[in-house]
Image (cartoon, rainbow, N blue to C red):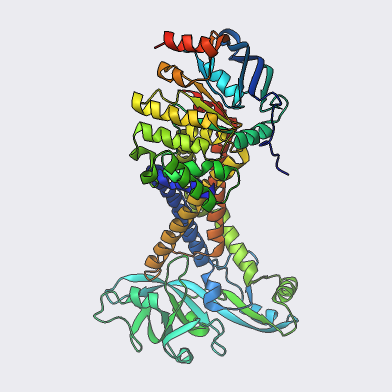
Amino acid sequence: MKSDYSHTHAPDGTAVRADAVTKTYGKGDSRTVALKQTSFSTREGELHLVVGPSGCGKTTLLSVVAGTLAWDQGQIEVFGLTLNGLSQAEITTFRRQNIGFIFQQFNLIPTLTTVENVSVPLLLNGHPRAVAETRAVEMLKEVGLADKLTKRPSDLSGGQQQRVAIARALVHQPRLIICDEPTSALDSTTGHHIMDLLAGAARAPGRCVIIVTHDNRTYGFADRITEMEDGRVKHVYAGPELHTFIQSHR
Amino acid sequence: MYHLALKMLMGDRAKYVMLVGGLTFSALLMTQQNAVFQGLLSWTTSHMRNMRASIWVVEKNVEQVNETKAMRDTDVNRVRSVGGVDYAVPMFQSILKARAADGSDKPVQVIGLHGATLVGRPPQMVRGELGHLRLPNTVVIDELAVQRLSVGRRQPLALGDTFEINDREARIVGICRTERHFFGYPYVFTSYDQALQFAPRQRKMLSIILAEPKPGFTAEHVARAIERETNLKAFTVPEFTVATIAFIWKNTGIPASFMTTIILGFIVGIAVSGQTFYSFVLENLRHLGALKAMGASNGLLARMLLLQAFTVGLIGYGIGVGLAAGFGFAVMPVGQPPFLLDARSMLITAVALVIICGFAALLGIRRVARLEAAIVFRA
């Protein structure tokens, strides 16, 4: 029987909790500690930005939280489910059911149309092709690409490709949406539009959006910002502190 | 997801064409060379299909059907006396010189048939009457002989025309159709007594004894009885076929040279398809990583890669075998090179392509299984 992880829930509304997570790359002289006893948490209904200089461990944090990268020590809990101890197959199933991804490089499959690209998460979750494509079309209309249904990624602008990626991330209504530099390749108008879409997704009940970014134009959309430095969380900004942080980075 | 796997494959035109092209070439090379080899092997045993007898009795040191070691004429009666033998008739077989109209000498395969029964007669008469072989100096020649011996004539040889075999006149009373012989010499059928007139006289002239078992006896049983009681060698048709092919395998370089080409076709298939498919997987690694991040299991990705590999394999097989068959249709009317495309040859190619595609897919599967989904987060 296939496992169903789509209804797990933390009683206190925590979407993601990472406690004292350590991740090391390489061995011997080339050994690099990317995460040093890092702790991180975010709540349902939040758009949470993770910021910091290059190489500070943002993307590694995102990867281990998403279960795409094995970590060495510490505990990770997503929607009340502890990922420690789950097999790789179980983590894959969990990801399939609960997480939507938006990548910096879009990672759309170039030989597929926009509808086919967007239908992938539904197909992976076992939906029939006709249902998957119908819902993909609806999702593409929601992100303003009704006239691009049969186009291939190479026929679209960067902003349009990122909107296809957002449609793909949202189409199976995942509870956690993980974004890696979603606006870095976009002009400010398009980036603003993309962030509007993501903020809307984050506010939906039981959902959460985590964005790793260098782009300070996106800070104004955040409910919380975690600043990282040298593999550790330097500070978490929320409430009035967040406002001050955003003002200081304008 | 499988339809998307196929779109991913076929959408990359250059790789797709290269994969199909490589597999097509490999399938064509293996099938065509195998078919030519099988055709050549079938030529080595064409004697048995041209003369059709259940039991072939030969001198005890004969190893294969194209070899002649003469026996004594009395050996026919010794074979006839063996229990289970319905009848046994003498046959003469030798390569003699025939003179074409332009004065050149052409080697021909002269077959001397038992005059009373004409056992060993050619399978299909095209023109003329076989029974006329009982008349003096008469022959029935095959279509290849018509072609070879008509050199220097205005019209091809026809019924009633004459030519010389070893300076003796031979009059054509029939033209027949035969399967081509391994040595490539045309067939000239005549009566046993007449053949002895054409051939230089030797102490022993009997080449082969053709025999049939009585009803209720198997050819194998009677053949063993003949060997026991006469100290001659007796073959059934399957036994003589196996012995002849084994002789060719053991004593000629023909199988080795064909096998080399077939193996080269296999290696080309492995090298081109394996390398191309692996580079297709490498180029798609980010996309496969994205699929993995989105929740595609290793098993699903492996099945997608297998589907892609076997789809190009099936297409390449179809085109390759089709081209090989086309080659066969083109050369068969000409008569050479020999070509025999049977189900076994096609099965061998199919098995080879399954191995090639399985190998190519395995390279990709190993790479994808080791792939961390986190690759998609790296710039």
Query: In the rendering, at what x and y percent does residue B5 appear?
Result: 50, 45
Query: In the rendering, at what x and y percent does residue B369 appear?
Result: 59, 33
Query: In the rendering, at what x and y percent does residue B80 appear?
Result: 69, 82
Query: In the rendering, at what x and y percent does residue A111 appear?
Result: 41, 43
Snapshot quadrant of residue B248: bottom right
Q: Nearer the viewer, residue B71 or B370?
A: B370
Snapshot quadrant of residue A250: top left
Q: Give the left or right position of residue B174, taking residue B367 as reference.
A: left
Outermost residue to the front: A240
Quarter of the N terminus of chain A within the rendering: top right
Q: Give the left or right position of residue A12, taking residue B47 as reference.
A: right
Is residue B32 visible to the viewer in this orientation of the structure?
Answer: no
Look at 40% across and 46% down and name the residue there.
Answer: A149
Q: Give the left or right position of residue B73, taking residue B43 as reference.
A: right
Q: Nearer the viewer, residue B191 or A157?
A: A157
Residue B343's place in the image compared with A88, above or below, is below
